[in-house]
Amino acid sequence: MTVSARDLTSEWLLDLASERSGLSDFGDLPFRSGIDVLLWSLAHESGNPPGRVALIAESLVLPALVKRLRLVDDRKRYPEIAAQEVTAPIVITGLPRTGSTHLQALLATRPGARSPAEWEMRLPSPPPEAATAGSDPRIAEVQRAIDGRPNAARLQSIHPYGARRPEQCLGLVDWSFANQTYLAYQRIPAYYEWYLNADQRVVYEHHKRFLQHLQFRHPGQWVLKWPKHLFGLDALLEVYPDARVVWTHRDPAKAVPSAVSFVGTLRAMNSPVFDPLRFGAEWSALEEMGLHRGLEVRDRVGDERFLDVQYNDLITDPVAAVTRIYEHFGVSVDDETVRRVDDFTEENPQGKHGAHEYTPEQFGFVPERVRRRFAAYTERFGIEPDRPRPAKAR
């Protein structure tokens, strides 16, 4: 039974998670403050009626709490998990909508590469095994949940999504409750401020423990991706000092409105106070802040830690882009990898699930003004407007 918003507390949610899982140890890493701020912000700022606040909080927090309990329990049952070495992950970051999702999937086609799949980040316990990576019954369970989402087809046209697809790192850190997705779903200013000031070192300790968990029975060379790594790039490089960072670039006049449209779709579906113009200003400011945070870290640690990839190059010649990345990091690319990259490109053309339909003006953007706003960034990295996609060979 769901409680009222007035009685909603983190203690109630923790007790409910323990009841549903039969477990009580939430582990040693801090996580409570994010939940407390989220609950306050939902109750006082989100604009949702009191009867819905508890339902929303339960749906957002409870699954990650149950996941946390099971991850902690598995780590105690299998001490070998804590001994796993996470070595030299390839980490893709950059502004969203710059080709990073496609690039992660392409790099993951290489034999021996390993990217976290959506199903194993949602339902990681017991630890996944290599032998059943394609047949584990959790795959079908997660796919049913994905297919059953409201507006599933529309969301699929914006961001390809599937239980077995490589997915971004949000699912590796959501159990820390420093979760950017909460901001996508609801207008919660207090949590927004808390998120921007969260201890990113703690977030990446969660991230690493999850990777240790996933590679325990299914090892491989990690290929990771998340635009929001820009917000904690210094912490990421502390936790993974040998990380190999790929930074994707695209014309901000295309990338920023596209990102705002995608997240705005989620906000409009969930929040009762959605205003597209206000949201456009809010979310573009968040993305700009992340970019500048990432650039500040890059200026401190040096450009040599990063490999830049242009969206235009990735789309024009995916094989060349993948080859360049792997060879830059000292990894050879064989004929099998080339074949797999070609096959994935052929099987996953842009627009496979429908067009992402929006206009920048819906959210208050004028492309030339966006370009002026990001001019220093585009000049630094030689970013050009999107080129036409190459014609399909016949």
Image: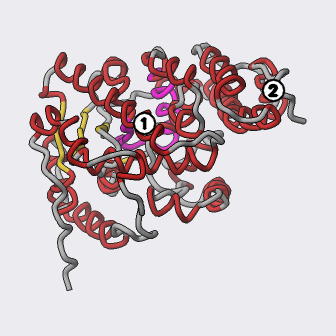
Q: Quadrant of the N terminus?
A: top right
The answer, for residue 126, to whether it is visible in the render is: no
Q: Residue at x 34, y 67 (%)?
A: 350
Tell me the kind of residue under disc 2.
Answer: Ala
The location of residue 173, given as percent across then percent down, is 51, 30
Q: Is residue 210 magenta?
A: yes
The location of residue 118, given as percent across then percent down, is 53, 49
Assess disc 2: are there few (<14), some (14-19) or many (≥20) residues with their C-alpha within 10 Å of its C-alpha.
many
The answer, for residue 55, to whether it is visible in the render is: yes
Nearest the viewer among 201 and 350 is 350
The dot on residue 283 is 1
Nearest the viewer among 102 and 326 is 102
Q: CA distance from mark 1 to mark 2?
A: 27 Å
Q: Residue at x 33, y 46 (%)?
A: 365
Residue 30 shown left or right of residue 282 in the figure: right
Q: Quadrant of residue 323?
A: bottom left
Residue at the disc numbered 2: 5
Q: Residue at x 22, y 60 (%)?
A: 315
Mark positioned earlier in the residue sequence (1 or 2): 2
**What SS does tag 1 mark?**
helix
Magenta-tinted stretch: 204-227
